[in-house]
Amino acid sequence: MKESKKFHPADSIIGRDYRPPGGREKERADFTTNSSIFRLIPLTIIVGVMGALVALVLVWLIGVITNILYYQVVDFHLRSPKDNTLGWLSVLIPIVGGIIVGFMARYGSVLIKGHGIPEAMENILVGGSKVQPKLTILKPISSAVSIGTGGPFGAEGPIILTGGALGSLLAQFLKLSSIERRSLLVAGAVAGMSAIFGTPIAAVLLGVELLVFEWKPRTMVLMGIASAVADILRHVFVGQGWMSPEPLFPVGHVPMGGGAGLMDAVLLGIACGGLAWVATKAVYGAEDAFRKIPIPWMWWPAIGGLIIGVGGMIAPRVLGVGYDTIADELAGSLTMNTLLLIFVVKLLVWALGLGSGTSGGILAPLLMMGAAVGGLMGHVIPGGTPTDWAVLGMAGLLSGVTRSPFTSIVFALELTHDTDLLLPLLITTTIAHFISVLILKRSILTEKVARRGFHVLREYEVNTMDTLFVRDVMITNVLSVESGRSLEDVVKILRSYTEKRIQRVLPVVEKGKLLGLVLWQDVMEMALDQDLKGKTANDIMIKKVVVANPDESLAEVADRMSVCKVGVLPVVEQKNPSELKGLITQYNLLDARSWRLHEEEQKEKVLHLSWLHKFMPHLFQNYAGKKHAKNSNTAKRNDAQ
C-alpha cells in the first residue's frame, strides 16, 4: 500500500520485501522432547512392574474362577471351559457372572463395562488422564468374573485399562502435568498388554495407534521401557499360569511367495475389511437392542450371560479367552464345519455379550474369528497352507476392526515368530484397513467414544504451524505513527486507512524504533467521547509489549498469544528488539491452514511432453511441428467463425 497524502511524513510504512536470512530455525531439533523426561523413567519402570504383576494376577483370577466353577478344582492355571462335563448346568455359570458384573457396575463404577480400550481413550482425551482409583480394583475383578464364568472375551482390554489406571494413579500422587500423567497411563497400559501376550513391540505400536494419538519420544520412550520391563518379568514368571518363554502361538516357518500366494493375501484382506464392518455393526447393534429392553441396565449382563451359556452349549470352543482354540486354528487341525461354527457363534455371543454391558477385551476374540475366516478361505481357495491362511486372517480382521495395521502386523509376527509371512501380512492388513476406513466412519473402539460425545481423529500429520515461520505470513505493510503525534492526527490517519480489519494496533515508533502500541479501539472510543484534545499517542500507548521474531514458528507464536490473551504481536528482530519489522495477528495464523488446503486441493500439471523434448529429441522431433500446425488450424477456425 502506498502512503496516503494525508499521512504525516513522519508516519512510516514498512515495505513488503522483508525476508531475513536463516535464523534460529537452524538451531531447531527434529523433536521437542528434552531432558525433563529423565525424571519419569524411574516411575515408568515401576509402572511396568505393576502392569506385569496385575496381568499375572488377572490371569490367576480367571484361571481359579474357571477351574472352580467348570471343573470343581482349585487351580490357578488358565484352562478353557470347553471340556467341562456339566451339561446344561453350565448355562447358569455365565448368567451368575453377568449378575455379579451388573451389580459391580451399578454399585461400584459404571466404567467397568465394556472392553477397556475406549475407556482408556476417553481418560486420555478429556479426563486429564485422571483414572478413578477404584477402577484399579473393580476392572480386573469384574473382567476375571466375566471371563472366568465363560465370557467369550480377551483379558487384554481390561488389562490395558487396569495398567493405565495404575500408571495414572501413581502419577496423581505426584505433581505432574496432564501430558506426563498421560505418558505414565499409556506406559501402564502397554505394559499390561506386553505381559499378557508377550508382544512388547506390538504393545508399543498399539499405544501409538490407539492411545496417545501422537508419535513423540516423550511417550514412545516411556512406552518402550514399560513394555520391555513387563516382558522381562513375564519371563521371570515362566510356568506361572499361562506364561511361557515361547511365543503364544508358535508355528513352523511358512514360506508364502509368488503371485498366487500374494493374490490370496489380497482376497483375504478384502474379506477381512468387509467383516470388520460386520463385527462393528454387530457389537453396537446389540448395544442399541439392549437399550430397548424395558428392565434396569444392571440386569442386561445376566441376559448376555444366558446367550453366552446357550452359545457355549452349541460350540463350547467359543467360551473363555480361547487361546487353545486359536492354536488349533493355526495348526490347521479344525474342519471347515467347525471353523464356520466357531466364527458364527463366537461373533454372536461376543457381540451380544459386549452389547449387554459386561466386561471383557476384544483382541483375543478377533484373533479367533480372524483365524477362523482365514481357515475357511483356505478350504475354499486352493493354494497356501492352513497356518498361513489363519495367521493372515487373524491379522487382517484385527487390522480392519481396530484400524491399526502396524500393530496387527507386528502382533502376528510376535505371536507366531514366523517372519516368512511379512509381505503377505503387509498386503492383507493394508487392504483390510483401507476397506474398513472407506466403509466405516469409526472403528469399534472410537465408536464407543463418539457415543459418549467425543471425537477421535486418528490421522497423524505434521502441523503446518510448526513448519511455517512468522516471516512467511506476517504483515509487512504496517502503518505506524511517530512518537509525540497528537491523537487528533492519529484519528485522521485511522479514518483514511483502508485496512482497518487487518491492522488493529498502531505501533508508536521513534526513528524506526518501537516504543509501544496504541489500540485502534481505544483511540476511536476517545474520539466518540471527544476526549482527544491535548493528548498524544504516547499518553495511551501500551509500553510493555509482547513481541514475536521473524524466525519463530507459527506454533510458538500461537502459544504466546494464547498465554498472554492477545490477538496481535509486533514482529521485531531478536538481536535488535526495538526494530519493527511487521505485525502478526491471529488471522495470519490461519494462513497455515490455507497453505495446507492449497496443497490438498490445488491440482496442477507440472511437467509437459515439451519438457522431455530437450532430453529425447529423436522421440519428439515432430512434436513442435505438429503443435504449430494444430495452433495454425485453430487460428484459422477462429478467423472463419
Image (spheres, helix red, strand yellow):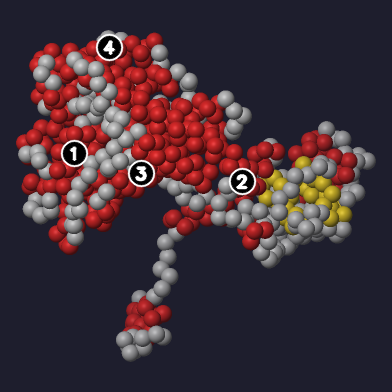
Q: Which residue is mark 3?
A: 202
Callout 3: helix, strand or loop? helix
Callout 4: helix, strand or loop? helix
**Dot 3 amino acid type:** Ala
- Kindly identify the residue that appears in the image at 55 percent across and 26 percent down: 172
Which dot marks residue 35?
2
Of callouts 1 and 3, the N-terminal one: 3
Which dot marks residue 327?
1
How many callouts does the rendering have?
A: 4
Rounded to the nearest angstrom, the CA distance separating label 4 from label 3 is 35 Å
- Kindly identify the residue that appears in the image at 59 percent across and 32 percent down: 176
Rounded to the nearest angstrom, the CA distance separating label 4 from label 2 is 50 Å
Q: Is residue 67 left or right of residue 580?
A: left
Q: Nearer the viewer, mark 1 or mark 3?
A: 1
Q: Position of residue 97 (x, y in %)?
A: 26, 15
Of callouts 2 and 3, the N-terminal one: 2
Of callouts 4 and 2, the N-terminal one: 2
Q: Position of residue 298 (x, y in %)?
A: 31, 12
Rounded to the nearest angstrom, the CA distance separating label 2 from label 3 is 26 Å
The N terminus lies in quadrant: bottom right
Q: In which image quadrant can residue 41 be found?
A: top right
Q: Which residue is mark 4?
A: 99
Callout 1: helix, strand or loop? helix
- Kindly identify the residue that appears in the image at 61 percent across and 50 percent down: 554
